[in-house]
Amino acid sequence: MINGADWNKDGFLDFSEFASFYHCLNEGLVKQVDPGNMSCDSHETSEHPKEEDEVGTDLRDAFKLFDKNGDGYICAEELQSVLSSMGIPQGKLLTDCRDMIRSVDVDGDGQVNFDEFKKMMASGIGGK
């Protein structure tokens, strides 16, 4: 499953790949995961494009999976909790999670807010 989530085939799950993977896993739809379009099945979006507000809802739901305390931010500890609970190796060290957060933290506050999360998911980039 993790190999399927590594959409850029670099051997690592970056934050956007993991976010998309986790979203799909919670939906029970892990097939082909593409963090650029939040689709759990890449064929689904080509045949039936999602409405813009449906994509926004999907992104908000994915964000909430990581924002454990509901404060509107994803911190390194929350990311580590999610990664660790799934047995993802990148979740073992808090420093790795901080690096992942830093790679998408535009405003430098040490957390990922929804706008940063949305930009990250749209661009498909994140830390390793």
Image (cartoon, helix red, strand yellow):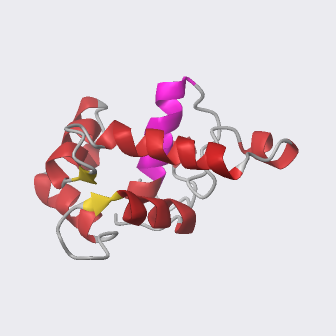
Residue found 64% across the figure and 48% down from its top? 53
Q: Is residue 27 magenta?
A: yes
Does 8 sit above or below residue 78? below
**Residue at the location (25% across, 52% down)?**
74
Query: In the rendered view, does 111 fall on the left or right side of 19?
Result: left
Q: Which residues are magenta?
A: 17-28
Which residue is at the front of the view, 8 or 97? Answer: 97
Please say whether residue 83 is visible from this viewpoint.
yes
Q: Residue at x 31, y 59 (%)?
A: 113
The front one of 12 and 16 is 16
Quadrant of image for the C terminus = bottom left
Res. 1 visible in picture: no
- Residue 110 sits in which quadrant? bottom left
Single out the residue that lies furthest toward the top. 28
Residue 81 drawn at (x, y percent): 20, 38
Q: Is residue 51 above or below residue 113?
A: above
Residue at the limit of the structure toward the right, as seen here: 47
Q: Position of residue 32 (x, y in %)?
A: 65, 41
Q: Residue furthest bottom?
A: 107
> Could you say where residue 5 lies in the image, as x and y percent from the top left?
53, 45
Q: Is residue 52 left or right of residue 49?
A: left
Judged left or right of residue 76, residue 120 is right
